[in-house]
Amino acid sequence: MINALYEPFPESVFADGKEYPIITDFREWFKFADMTADKELSDREKLVLMTGWLLDEPDRITNELVTALCDFYRAKALEPDPPEYYDDEPQEDSVTAPPVLNWKIDATFIIGDFLHYYGIDLLTAEMHWWRFRILFSALPEDSQMMKRIAYRGADLGQIQNESERKRIMKMKQLYALPFELDDEAIGAVFGGTM
C-alpha cells in the first residue's frame, strides 16, 4: 500500500523484471474498462489492445504484465494490505452480484458530482487515474453517484421494515444496471451447476 498523502502516483507498471511507462490520464482508463468489458472482443484481442496503455511496446504479453495493468486500473496499491490471515481464495458457493457501477452508464452523474462537490469539470480536467479514483471514492453519501451505488448494492433481506424494503426495491430497480449471468452463475443461484 502506498500513502497517497506523500508518495507520488506511478507513471509506470513493473512486470517481468522491466518497468513499462504507461498512460495515466483518467479518461484513458475509462476506455480500458470499456475495452475489457466489450463482449465483441475475444480474450486474445483484449490482450493485444491492453498494450495500447503502455508507452513502450512489450516484447511479449505475459500474465505478469496483464496483472500489472489490471492492478493499476484497480489502483490496487491504494488499498490496505490484507491481514496475514486473510483468505483470498474465492468461495465455491459465492454468487456473482449484479454490478453497482458502470463508468459509461453513470458518466453524466459522475461528471455532475465532480463539478458540484469538487468544482472539477471532468470534460476539461487533467488528472491522474488514481487521483480520480481517490476523489470518486470520497464523494459524499448524498451525491447522485453514491446514492445509486447504495441502492444497487442494498441487501433487501437485511431490511426489516416492509414499506422501506418496498421503497428500496423500487429504487434498486430504477437504478439497476444491465447484468447477465452465465450458465455456471445461474446454476450456483439455484444450488447446483448447469
Image (spheres, rainbow, N blue to C red):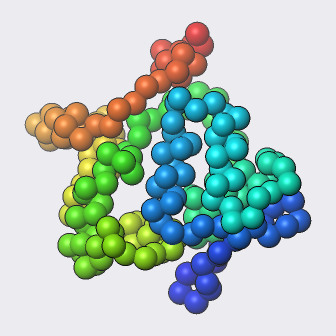
Q: Is residue 76 visible?
A: no
Q: Residue 174: name its quadrant.
A: top left
The correct choice, above or below, for 181 with respect to 6 in the image is above
Q: Position of residue 65 (x, y in %)?
A: 76, 55
Asked if residue 86 lies left or right of residue 175, the reply is right
In the rendered structure, the answer to whether residue 138 lies left or right of residue 162 reads: right
Residue 12 or 165: which is nearer the viewer?
Answer: 12
The single residue placed furthest to the top in the displayed view is: 194
Which residue is pictured at 58% across the width and 58% down the height? 73
Res 58 quadrant in image: bottom right
Q: Nearer the viewer, residue 90 or 7?
A: 7
Q: Residue 187 at what x, y percent from top left?
A: 53, 15
Spot occupied by residue 36 in the image (x, y as percentages of width and height): 56, 42
Image quadrant occupied by the N terminus: bottom right
Residue furthest to the left: 163
**Residue beneath the point at 33% across and 73% down:** 124
Task: Give percent across and percent down for residue 154.
Answer: 31, 43
Q: Is residue 81 above or below residue 33?
A: below
For residue 67, side relative to residue 189 (left or right): right
| Image height of 34 relative to 163, above or below | below
Instruction: Evaluate whether residue 125 shows in this view.
Output: yes
User: Which quarter of the rendered picture does the C terminus lie within?
Assistant: top right
Q: Residue at x 85, y 67 (%)?
A: 18
